[in-house]
Image (cartoon, rainbow, N blue to C red):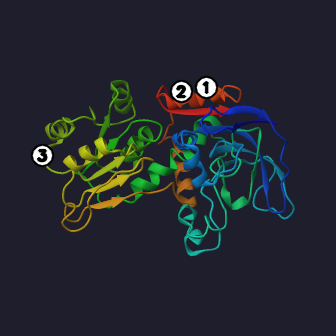
């Protein structure tokens, strides 16, 4: 079968011929109908040799931690799904037995790393191939008649902002203000989720005017450039005072400076982007009652909820479609910021 693999550190991914995998006991094989390209993949492919070695990911590695497909074959003892079922893959698998996993929060399993359990495309072979082996049927969520191309990004680009926003729902009451920084693949979904789930006034910030127009299209009440004037423009639009929650899908020092200018007592600072920042915390290091969170992916039950939002027409993912042979170009466009929403590879 064909697979899009990261082969050499620092080099673009390659389309290669690899053996078609067979499911072992308890496993499920999917015929992939769509796979998503994500900034996490681009981040991994941008690591130096030393940095990559710290992650311990094998090479070559088939990319793609967003995947949907049709159940194609069942390993001995695999139950809960049937051949022909259309399903989405829940990526951040854990041990399946601990307290976090029992609640569906496999994204926070404390044992996964020690057991060598990694997500598809981020440590084990992923969905950018004609077939994918899934280790357990519990990691599959039915999607029914949903369009695979439109639904594949729900597994990360939908699930991650949904999980991030759910942690702030008690604050996002009528009269509250929510700011989304970075209106890309995750950010444009976050805007829609905030409009569907909350009564907050939603404000989008980005460095690109086209992305601000995009934010308005998907439901932002206001959209401004993320520069030194952002705080004053927000104050003009909604009144002076701190915002209720900031959902940062970029996470770097210039963005943190903007976040600080927007924050006050009880502001939620939700850092979703893959970058890192240095900041003071504690009673005298941040506004009283404010919270800083760094959510990772989301829970299995939350993926079911996100799929239902798409099924009922409350969530729509902007996509650009590529063939498997065009996979390297999809990642180039992702890296160069040329995508409006999510890149989807269809084998």
Badge 2 crowding class, 10 Å Cα cut-off, few under 14, some 14 to 19, many 20 or more, is few
Q: Quadrant of the C terminus?
A: top right
Circles 3 and 2 in contact, beta carbons < 8 Å: no
Nearer to us in this view, 71 or 341: 341
Q: Which mark is residue 240?
A: 3
> Mark 3 falls on what kind of element?
loop
Q: Which quadrant holds residue 210? A: top left
Image label count:
3
Image coordinates of residue 64 in percent, x first then y, are 64, 42
Q: Nearer the viewer, mark 3 or mark 2?
A: 2
User: Where does label 1 land, which residue?
Assistant: 329
Badge 3 crowding class, 10 Å Cα cut-off, few under 14, some 14 to 19, many 20 or more, is few
> Mark 2 falls on what kind of element?
helix
**Picture layout, residue 281 above or below residue 241:** below
Q: Residue visible at 51% across and 31% down?
A: 335
* First in sequence: mark 3 vs mark 2: 3
Circles 1 and 2 in contact, beta carbons < 8 Å: yes
**Picture layout, residue 275 above or below residue 115:** above
User: Where does label 2 land, which residue?
Assistant: 333
Image coordinates of residue 296 in percent, x first then y, are 48, 56
**Picture layout, residue 108 above or below residue 58:** below
Mark pair 3, 2: CA separation = 39 Å
> Mark 1 falls on what kind of element?
helix
Image coordinates of residue 4 in percent, x first then y, are 70, 35
Determine the residue located farthest toward the front in the rendered image. 50
């Amino acid at each position: 079968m064909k697979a899009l693999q990261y082969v050499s550190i620092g080099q673009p991914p390659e389309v290669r011929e690899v053996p078609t995998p067979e499911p072992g006991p308890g496993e499920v094989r999917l015929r992939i109908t769509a796979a998503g390209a994500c900034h996490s993949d681009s981040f991994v492919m941008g690591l130096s040799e030393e940095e990559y070695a710290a992650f311990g990911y094998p090479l070559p590695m088939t990319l793609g931690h967003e995947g949907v497909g049709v159940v194609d074959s069942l390993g001995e003892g695999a139950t809960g799904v049937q051949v022909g079922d259309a399903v989405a893959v829940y990526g951040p698998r854990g041990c399946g037995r601990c307290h976090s996993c029992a609640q569906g929060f496999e994204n926070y399993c404390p044992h996964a790393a020690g057991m060598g359990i990694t997500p598809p495309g981020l440590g084990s072979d992923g969905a950018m191939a004609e077939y994918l082996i899934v280790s357990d049927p519990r990691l599959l969520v039915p999607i029914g008649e949903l369009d695979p191309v439109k639904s594949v990004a729900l597994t990360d680009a939908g699930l991650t902002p949904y999980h991030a926003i759910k942690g702030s729902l008690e604050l996002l009451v009528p009269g509250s203000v929510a700011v989304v920084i970075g209106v890309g693949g995750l950010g444009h979904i976050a805007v829609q989720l905030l409009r569907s789930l909350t009564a907050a006034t939603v404000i989008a910030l980005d460095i690109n005017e086209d992305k601000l127009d995009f934010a308005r299209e998907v439901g932002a009440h206001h959209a401004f450039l993320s520069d030194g004037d952002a705080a004053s423009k927000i104050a003009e639009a909604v009144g002076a005072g701190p915002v209720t929650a900031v959902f940062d899908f970029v996470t770097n020092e210039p963005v943190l400076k903007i976040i600080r200018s927007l924050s006050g007592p009880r502001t939620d600072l939700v850092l979703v982007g893959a970058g890192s920042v240095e900041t003071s915390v504690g009673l005298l290091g941040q506004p009283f009652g404010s919270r800083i969170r760094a959510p990772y992916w989301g829970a299995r039950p939350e993926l079911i909820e996100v799929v239902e939002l798409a099924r009922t027409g409350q969530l729509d993912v902007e996509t650009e479609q590529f063939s498997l042979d065009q996979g390297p170009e999809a990642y180039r466009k992702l890296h160069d910021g040329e995508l409006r929403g999510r890149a989807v590879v269809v084998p």
